[in-house]
Image (tube, rainbow, N blue to C red):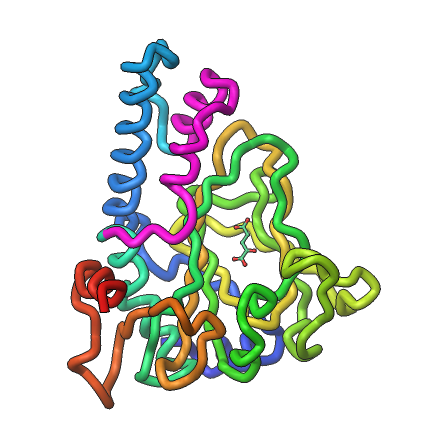
Amino acid sequence: MLTPDQVESYEEDGFLVIEDLFDPSELQILYDDFDSVVDNWANVYYEQGRLLNLFKDDPFEYRLFSIHQALKGNCHELLSAVSGKRKTAGMFYVMVLPQILNVVESIIGSEILVHPQFNARAKLPDGKSVVPWHQDLGYLHKNAENTFMVNFWLPLVDATVENGCLEVIRGSHNYGIVPYENGAEDLVSESIPNGEIVCCPIRVGSVLMIQHKTVHRSTPNFSDHIRWSLDIRYSDPRLPTGRDSVPGFVARSVENPELVAKSHHDWLNLFEL
Ligand SMILES: O=C(O)CCC(=O)C(=O)O
């Protein structure tokens, strides 16, 4: 659970870094999950004669990029297979880590939905991929404006200034909806709230928490390896998510314990209804 000081700081600043929230070994199932996808696609490309080396000995943060370079970037299937809304056992395991849910519970109480907007990201060290200043609410229907969301960004390799960690604007969650120019990614520049820009390098096992109106961005990856990360969100299942056509799943509930998803199969079943 968060301490009262941590809750106050999260509410006042619109963000909070929690160092070493969980042991990095908790991510092993997710690493294995990504490794098997990368391995499968490497084998496909190898059998097609397009890839001459499987780069099997490359560590997690290098292998995908080695393949990407060897294929001169021509591996879109692989990139999309490791990115975005992956509904796997590994994702489910991390999304319902008790250490994370306890933190969420100390902010929004015991009714907890894993929000349908989430992403896995493999940010390549190309020195250019960025996510410009935005609010997460910008990607959602505005009916979620008043739904408090506890949004986590968690690195799967240590996130540094060099490999493109996140930056947040302290206090920017108090400005309401900031106007957008061309879709969610383009905040009208003169409307970007004034405030201290805080750079948030964090190591694996630590998390950056923001809110759905906190203005933040991610910076380019100038390192030699991939900056892998997840962004996952939590809200009260009784409130609009702003993506109401896509189900999230209930991770904790005192009111309706029978709705709690016990495995990623329960989560997948929600898409069958
Ligand atoms: O991981 C990134 O590069 C961007 C993440 C982000 O902007 C978000 O979680 O909303």
Left or right: where 21 falls relative to 187: left
- Residue most extreme to the right: 190
| x, y percent for residue 169 | 68, 64
| x, y percent for residue 206 | 43, 56
Q: State whether residue 130 is above or below residue 226.
A: below
Reply yes or no: does residue 67 show up in magenta: yes
- How many numbered marks have been drawn onto this rendered protein structure? 0
What residue is shown at x 78% (from left), y 62% (from top)?
188
In the foreground, 66 or 223: 66
Quadrant position of the N terminus in the picture: bottom left
What residue is shown at x 54% (from left), y 27% (from top)?
224
What residue is shown at x 46% (from left), y 49% (from top)?
203
Location of residue 252 (image quadrant)? bottom left
Location of residue 152 (image quadrant)? bottom left
- The magenta region covers 61-88
In the foreground, 240 or 222: 240
| x, y percent for residue 91 | 30, 54
